[in-house]
Amino acid sequence: MATVRNSIGQDTIGQDTIAAVITPPGEGGVSIVRVSGPMAFSIADRCFHCAPPLPSQRLENTFVYGHVRSGNENIDEGILLMWRAPRSYTCEDVVELQCHGGVATATRVLRACLDAGARSADPGEFTRRAFLNGRIDLLQAEAIMDIVRAHSARAQAAAQQQLEGGLSRKFDAVYDALMLVAAQIEATLDFPEDELPESVPEKIRSEISSIQTQIQELLATWNEGHLLRDGAMVVLSGKPNVGKSTLLNALLGHDRAIVSDIPGTTRDSIEAEFVLDGVPLYLVDTAGLRESEDYVEREGINRTRKYMERADLHLHLIDMSQPADSESLEAFKALDPKKSILICNKTDLPRLFHVEQWPQVQRVEMALIEEKGVKELKKALKTLLSESIDLSARPHAVISERHRKVLESVEQEIQEVAGLIQTEDMEETLVLTIPALRDALKALGQVTGREYHEDLLDQVFSRFCIGK
């Protein structure tokens, strides 16, 4: 059953106190241990030795120098920062111990906090508490993880727009409009038969149409959201020795793949990240397409074909210095013009590759050994990416896969409502729209967290790291 969040703090009364290292593991200048919950200040009193007064007796939003202690032993010197509920990240009492960097020191400081009464935080539990206490909605909570995982400035900026409420306002507008329609329809059911004002049905139809438009506009941002969050998989395919590994290295600007004149050098897929105009691209250098008796190479070729099926963008290379063959011509026919670029490599050599009709895809001529054509390829890649992202526009909040699934279910419910209110006997069919409207409102509420259940929260926050 869904739970509707009410006033701040009602869902977290009586919760225990949690602690975790919130900085990345490894060597660094500073490590930070965060403690949140009703015992945060008493734990600080036990673990942190400083000049009087005790941490619990100090003003909020202050910091103090001292030593982290375990029993009578000084573990490390550091700084203690203090926030009191509800003016903190979680809307609870929070202290943060900033100590020297390094795994050993951070682990010992965390252990001191756990021995003093805290428990280890679960993944995403700090942000989960911020949501449950009403500081942020579910869309903003997801944006925090998107910011942490952003692989480009554009992805980070889009997530920041979502954190600031850009996407929440759009979903709230749809929810509020749908709630108004539901209220209007339920009000019309009180009218005596044949006395419904003529303006009411037309107004309801217009508002439903407007809601459908808003949903479609949100759905239209999914491709951009997918590319920014997950990156575009760019698969490099072609026969052995056409220059796939050389192309990968040229795009990256350094040697990532082994380049050799020996056919079949690349037997498994090699992946590398590359950012183009703020869009993360995951380049996949694949095994050359050919018949092979070698088991390992055959397995690599099978993986190549699977990657080609999943690719967001496909770069297919041909060697212009070799004659055309039936395999190459068949490969041409399989290229999707909406996501493919044909790379004509080795144009610095005499051309022996001739076909009567080129496939209807973008074509880029390159001489990779001389690093010619790389700029032209990047321009062609931008052209394909512009089908999903307006690279000239400012970054903006965009929906995720979870949001898309919810919106598609809502769209189906609204479509059912739209069909019922188009009938001539609308007064008789209005009552049939109520279940669909309620289901749509419930689904929309689970996007922002107006309504939620534990399984939904587990699904969202399981993506988070322990310190967030």
Image (tube, rainbow, N blue to C red):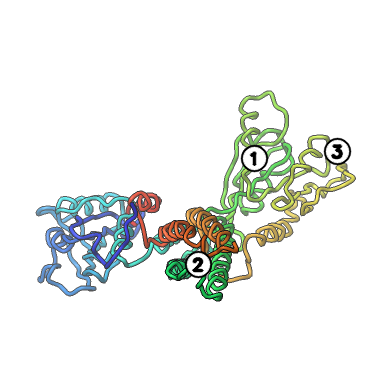
Q: Amino acid at mark 1?
A: Thr
Circles 2 and 3: CB atoms closer than 8 Å? no
Within-10-Å neighbours for mark 2: few <14, some 14–19, many 20+: some
Q: CA distance from mark 2 to mark 3?
A: 48 Å
> 345 above or below 435?
above
Residue pictured at 68% horizontal, 38% vertical: 260
Q: Position of residue 129 (x, y in %)?
A: 29, 60
> Looking at the rendering, which quadrant does residue 138 occupy?
bottom left
Within-10-Å neighbours for mark 3: few <14, some 14–19, many 20+: few
> Looking at the rendering, which quadrant does residue 319 occupy?
top right
Mark 2 vs 3, N-terminal side: 2
Residue 111 seen: yes
SS for dot 1: loop
Viewer-proximal residue among 28 and 113: 113
Viewer-proximal residue among 296 and 389: 389
Query: What residue does disc 3 label?
Result: 323
Query: What residue does disc 2 label?
Result: 157
Residue pictured at 68% horizontal, 46% vertical: 246
Circles 1 and 3: CB atoms closer than 8 Å? no
Residue 161 seen: no
Residue pictured at 77% horizontal, 54% vertical: 362
Position of the C terminus, as image quadrant, is bottom left
